[in-house]
Image (cartoon, rainbow, N blue to C red):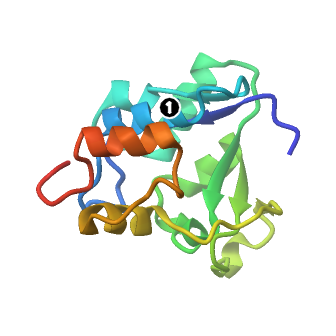
Amino acid sequence: MGWDQIIYVPAWRQPFKTDRQAASGYHRFAMIALAIRDNDVLFVSPIELERGGTSYSIDTLEAMRQRYPGASFDWVIGDDNVAQFLEWKDPARLLELARFVVLSRGGATVPESLAGRFVFAENATVPISATEIRRRVRAGEPIESLVDPLVSRYIHHHRLYREGHS
């Protein structure tokens, strides 16, 4: 895609994922930092953690544009997010602020009103999901072959994704 940098932005609280237990934003920030530690074009931003509350993409994009004036932004989403894009906060403004790049995760359908509004990237799909990794942790099954070794150790050390932990 010709990107100079890729910035990961862990959510404080995701508006569409309120029904399931997740690691705190700080833990997710730390795991991303561990996973990308050796790559000098990958970064992790605490922008949503600093803001707190429900994390809406529109608020983050507005803040990123203020923080990086003159920069152009691509917002990368999985194709499973496209179907509910119109439910996001201020979707029309989102499309003004950034180009949305869609990565294939399973072949979701684009709503007719959004046809042509997204760029679909060619990407390799990974046959494992974060949901499956969390399930394996809860079941006491190994994850070392699925995530960075330091991330695996972090998850186990902090007892993440086990019953009763957030």
Q: Is 15 displayed left or right of 130 in the figure?
A: left
Residue 145 in sight from this viewpoint: yes
Query: Residue 17 at x, y = what percent?
Result: 33, 61
Please, what is the three-letter code of the amino acid marked with disc 1?
A: Leu
Looking at the image, which residue is at 33% across and 68% down?
A: 135
In the rendered image, the vertical position of residue 151 relative to residue 132, given as above or below? above
Image location of residue 157, percent across then percent down: 27, 38
Residue hosting label 1: 34
Which of the two residues, 33 or 85, is positioned nearer the viewer here? 33
State the image quarter where residue 162 is shown. Answer: bottom left
Viewer-proximal residue among 28 and 81: 28
Q: Where is residue 33 in the image (x, y as percent from the top left)?
A: 50, 29
Mark 1 residue element: helix
**Badge 1: how crowded within 10 Å, few (<14), some, or many (20+)?**
some
Vertical position of residue 66 compared to residue 91: above or below: above
- Which of these two is toward me, 30 or 157? 157
Q: Which residue is drawn at 82% across and 36% down?
A: 3
Quadrant location of residue 43? top right
Q: How many labels does the image show?
A: 1
